[in-house]
Amino acid sequence: MSDLRRDPIGGRWVIVDTDHPNKPEDFEYDPHSLRGGTCPFCYGNEAMTPPEIEAIRDPDTRPNTSGWQVRVVPNKFPALQIEGELDRRGIGIYDMSNGVGAHEVLIETPYHGKDICDLLNSEIENFISMYCRRALDLIKDKRFKYILVFKNFGAAAGASLEHPHTQIVALPMVPKNVMEEIKGAHNYFEYRERCIFCDMIRQEMQEKERIILENKHFLAFCPFVSRFPFEIWIIPKKHNSYFCHMPAEEIPSLAVILKDTIARLKNIFPNLCYNFIIHSSPINGDGGIEGYHWHIEFMPKLTRVAGFEWGSGFYLVSTPPELAATYLRDK
Amino acid sequence: MSDLRRDPIGGRWVIVDTDHPNKPEDFEYDPHSLRGGTCPFCYGNEAMTPPEIEAIRDPDTRPNTSGWQVRVVPNKFPALQIEGELDRRGIGIYDMSNGVGAHEVLIETPYHGKDICDLLNSEIENFISMYCRRALDLIKDKRFKYILVFKNFGAAAGASLEHPHTQIVALPMVPKNVMEEIKGAHNYFEYRERCIFCDMIRQEMQEKERIILENKHFLAFCPFVSRFPFEIWIIPKKHNSYFCHMPAEEIPSLAVILKDTIARLKNIFPNLCYNFIIHSSPINGDGGIEGYHWHIEFMPKLTRVAGFEWGSGFYLVSTPPELAATYLRDK
């Protein structure tokens, strides 16, 4: 018999196949297949992107030339545009608005064919600190209510370019998914006067069976209510609502655990495509609350979301997180 | 500049690219690639499935032999199992339950390589009436709170078998997605004493620009707040909360519009994979309300859901529904 599990934050149910769980070799996942041609994110091709917003680069180099370690540029095909005021209006029963926001691309490294697990710790620390710098800069614009940081790696995960990059989006409203998570955490906080994520960390560290890795500041585990097989959360042990307020001493710990987590996954699933998303509190007064705890949700692309999930919001998880954690611990 | 559009039912926002919209030839969508071997859904292989639950078959044939037109069998790998009582319990901060439910497969036709647009109208009417019969039967089981009917067509849409089939799932709780839709519709109804879907039909028929097809009983249109390019809704013009209460005289109309809609889509996108989902009111007293209006949501698999959508619940729609409807009307 399968388990039904309920997400204590958003209230979502998932169905976990504990009877006939999928082992790693049972997945048919996509190998890469990405846009070819000259890579706009490689050294020497800086003119192919819009002018850089910010970079970590050798002191004797000029903007938009080689010599950078991390480079942030506007997305050439932005989902949202930086100019203008938000203008909400109705059309009959429908509501709409113009698409104001920011859409940036952070190029994590000059090396084209690398994944995070192939980089030096110091390189990873560099781009993580740049995540924070960009968020802190975008927050100054009071039109923005949420900063979304996410990475698509590989074609099956929706990436169009191979060169390792992360996207940073500033949104003019708090997305529904985020609002639900915030509200769920807030309700728990009101009731128990404790952060639900802190309680989750405590329970996971006690039960141990879903933990993959742990270091001084971070925990990596397969969540009890995983929506996808081999889903992983990376969470700071110390309560903190905003990732961009991460203390500087935590960054090396995050770099190590992120690198090691991805290395373990790719040891099991070579050429894996994945998404990760930083979940953080809304900004500029629209819903930022006590009881929210920032974290990274890591989603390997091993299965396809189909009619069942679209129709019900129930997720079918063919590998229980307890089993996934065993594989990931042993690798 | 892109549009932001807000779903008046669930409150979800989507971003519609009205500036640089994708035309049909801009999509790279997957061709089929499915499990090979002997097909358990073809004539002569009836013993490869669990024993049939119900079928439309020639009067002189026995169950589990050839001679059927539509056949319903239990899913060989069910997400939920029919036996047992629902047993909800907590584990620390988590909630769980055993996986009680029904998971059936409806084989739409004996012909292996066909899509709905290749069938006779009478064949489509047969399987639609079987959708209703199965739902009416499952509703009798008071443990079930929601009947989900959905179709995955093609590997990219999550199908594992090529032979045309639909899945019918009876769930022991109302899924969160459905509950939100129901609540959204209910709030509108409380405020205006009108069904939001009836208002939507009225507005769409007035504005015309998103309508693809219309017949006596049904309307096919690209919704204003599409989440996917070329998303299509098929909705009965007359208010009705439950698809399984569809009047018999509406079934031929639905068969015609479903067939024609899929034919038009495949004219533009040969070998298209897709999902469709019947959205209907919850059953057995758990949330069924005034102001909900059943309909089919049709989702062509042209794009991949990536970090942006997962992280925010915002969807990026690269072809505005007004443009998609133009292509579909002209084919």
Image (cartoon, coloured by chain):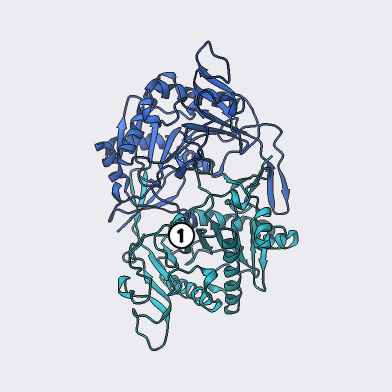
Chain colours: A cyan, B blue
Name the spot of residue B220 as percent of width and height, x first. 35, 34
Q: What quarter of the picture does the C terminus of chain B occupy?
A: top left
Question: In the image, is residue B43 above or below residue A311?
Answer: above
Q: Nearer the viewer, residue B161 or A83?
A: B161
Residue depicted at 67% across the width and 42% down the height: A2
Name the spot of residue B315 as percent of width and height, x first. 42, 52
Residue that sits furthest to the front in the current view: B37
Disc 1 is placed on an element classified as: loop
Residue depicted at 58% across the width and 18% down the height: B63
Residue depicted at 36% across the width and 66% down the height: A75
Q: Nearer the viewer, residue B90 or B40?
A: B40
Q: Residue A56's image quarter?
A: bottom left
- The answer to whether residue B167 is left or right of residue B315 is right
Pointer 1 chain? A
Q: Report the residue marked by disc 1.
A: A154
Q: Amino acid at mark 1?
A: Gly
Name the spot of residue B305 as percent of width and height, x first. 45, 52
- The answer to whether residue B191 is left or right of residue B94 is left
Q: Residue B49's image quarter?
A: top right
Number of other residues with Cα within 10 Å of mark 1, as a class: few under 14, some 14 to 19, many 20 or more: many
Question: In the image, is residue B175 above or below residue A161?
Answer: above
Q: What quarter of the picture does the N terminus of chain B occupy?
A: bottom left
Question: In the image, is residue A214 above or below residue B277?
Answer: below
Question: In the image, is residue A244 above or below residue B25?
Answer: below
Name the spot of residue B290 as percent of width and height, x first. 49, 32
User: Is any atom of residue B23 visible in this view?
Assistant: yes
